[in-house]
Amino acid sequence: MLNRKGVKYLLVLTALMAVALTVEAQSRKYHVELGLQGGCGYYVGDATTHIFNNVREVYGGHVRYKFDQRWAMQVKGLYQFIKGPIIEREITPDGKPKEVNLGEWTDDLINLDVMAEFNFFRFGIDDYDRRVKPITPYIFAGIGMGIYGMRFQKVACYFPFGFGMKWKFAPRWGLNLAWQHNLYFTDSLEGTEGYGNTYDLNGSNILNFDLTGQLTLGIVFEFAREKKICRLCYDN
């Protein structure tokens, strides 16, 4: 039978093992993340020259693979609606130019992109490492492909970039706020009815690209926990 001293040592050993198991559990990270997001989006180009004009809804989802607490790769798909005014340029009898608003054009976009992300802080939940933060700002950039036009018969590449905030409020759950900009390598997002060139809006500037933006808030769920490290194993 154990005496009082033996019971004391056993309790201390049990407490140390519990702490070690807790630290081990917190040090094992989840590598994969699924998320749903929604928000508002806009178009900037020949028909609309300012951000957050003619705002429409945006929604979609993403898959994120986290290499470590700083770097990650995200594959995202967003469905976006854009609109703007139809402007016709006329010449008045006295020879002065005049713009006439003929209504609105609309278009739908499917944005698919792959982006690299960098967290400014070591991101996660860890009670034993003060360097790890549950909230962090982050930046991202990558490459994307947009499908648009009537019956989605047009395709164009774009350069996605932006910044945002991440908040991990539970071991597997978090929130993401992102402001993304998509610089399209085209100048024809105004639709498929020839609006972009009919009124000579495109001009001859090869850098006169269209831009879309999305401000989204999303919820994420993490899974695919990294394997437990065996402290007692060794190679033969």
Image (spheres, grey):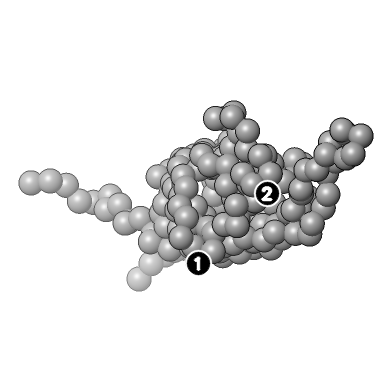
- Residue found at the far bottom of this picture: 1
Q: Which residue is mark 1?
A: 151
Residue pictured at 59% horizontal, 37% vertical: 209
Circle 2: residue type: Tyr
Choose between 127 and 40: the one closer to the eye: 40
> Quick check: 207 left or right of 15?
right
Q: Which residue is mark 2?
A: 43
Q: SS class of the residue under badge 2? A: strand
Regarding residue 72, the answer to whether it shows in the image is no
- Closer to the chain start, of discs 2 and 1, is 2
Which of discs 2 and 1 lies nearer the camera? The answer is 1
Residue pictured at 40% horizontal, 45% vertical: 67
Residue pictured at 47% horizontal, 47% vertical: 156
| Classed neighbour count for the residue bearing mark 2: other residues with Cα under 10 Å, few (<14), some (14–19), many (≥20) | many
Residue 2: image location, x then y, percent: 38, 67
Q: Quadrant of residue 204?
A: top right
> Quick check: 2 left or right of 181?
left
Circle 1: residue type: Arg
